Image (cartoon, helix red, strand yellow):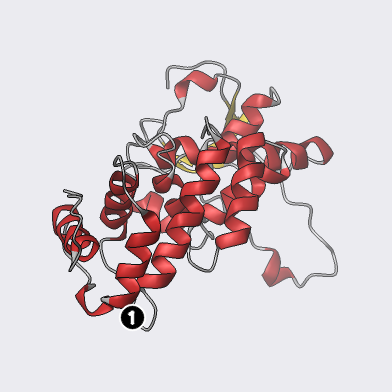
Amino acid sequence: MENQTQKSLFFKPKLDQSIPEQKMENKMIDKVFSTMNYEIFSSLDGNRIVNPLHVKKIADSMKIKVLFIPIIVNEEFQVIDGQHRLEARKQLGLDIPYIICPNYTLDDVHRANSNHKAWTNVDFLNAYAEAGVENYVFLKKLHDQYSDKISVSDLLALNCISRFNAMKYFKSGESKISDQSKCIDITKKWYIFYSTITKNKKPFSHHSSFIEVFRKIIDIEDFDFKRLIEKCEKYSDLLESQNSLGQYLFMLDKVYNYRSQSILRLK
């Protein structure tokens, strides 16, 4: 191996004399190495995004006591298990203990992570809000108010928060809100609208497309939100789950203008 900063760590078990002799038989299965050369490690494409809050949590724990838990890498030093421990140790300037498991792939990463509880969007929202990140404190208050109908991903879609790679930015704590008043207004309107159209109905499919259509129509000049709600209540039989953004737009245009003297095209 090229890096000379690594060393093999061997541990001689401390044997308890009270343990029967047959239970004290030990054999070395694999070698644990250690290095201060952080540059040799890399991530596998498709591996989970590193959660900076989780890294901080591990680092804070390590400040109290550093547990000897090696990371697992393949022969190319791509991290299979332990990328959060790796980042935490790097932040603290600690050496990296690791085990090399040749030929491990992304499938093995998924197997290693299958028993770990993945963070939900709500977990990320709560964690950043508790850390005092202003935009997330605001989003949490909004989500708490409307959580029976609006998910965290709905909030992001409704308010066009970093639409490109929205979840990536959200999970890294970088979501921005430029206009809180507008955010409150559109979220409240969606809550009223969606509560109205799903009354005695199942939730609509292709939810993200429906939200995008809603955002489009409420910004149309002379659009009357109250009229939309009244029409949806009166002609609820015209409201059905659709398969695409275009179909949802056509449906809402039909409902909004149904039996109306004044026509305002929404599409």
Considering the numbered disc 1 on the image, is that residue within a helix, a strand or a loop? loop
> Which residue is at the front of the view, 97 or 146?
146
> Which residue is at the front of the view, 148 or 198?
198
Whether 259 is drawn above or below 169: the answer is below
Q: Residue 157 appears at what percent x and percent y? A: 39, 46
The residue lying at 30 percent from left, 39 percent from top is 221
Residue 95 seen anywhere in this rendered image of the structure: no
Q: Name which quarter of the figure residue 94 lies in.
A: top right
> Which residue is at the front of the view, 115 or 260?
260
Q: Residue 175 appears at what percent x and percent y? A: 51, 35
Q: Residue 237 appears at what percent x and percent y? A: 23, 80
Q: Name which quarter of the figure residue 147 lies in.
A: bottom right
Binning the other alpha carbons within 10 Å of mark 1 as few (below 14), some (14 to 19) or many (20 upward) gives few
Please indicate whether residue 210 sits to the left or right of residue 24 in the image: left
> Which residue is at the front of the view, 203 or 23?
203
The residue lying at 33 percent from left, 53 percent from top is 211
View extreme (front): residue:
261
From the image, tell me which residue sits under label 1: 201
Please indicate whether residue 111 sits to the left or right of residue 250 in the image: right
Residue 191 seen anywhere in this rendered image of the structure: yes
Please indicate whether residue 232 sits to the left or right of residue 62 in the image: left
Whether 233 is drawn above or below 150: the answer is below
The amino acid on which the numbered mark 1 sits, given as a three-letter code, is Lys
Count of labels in the image = 1
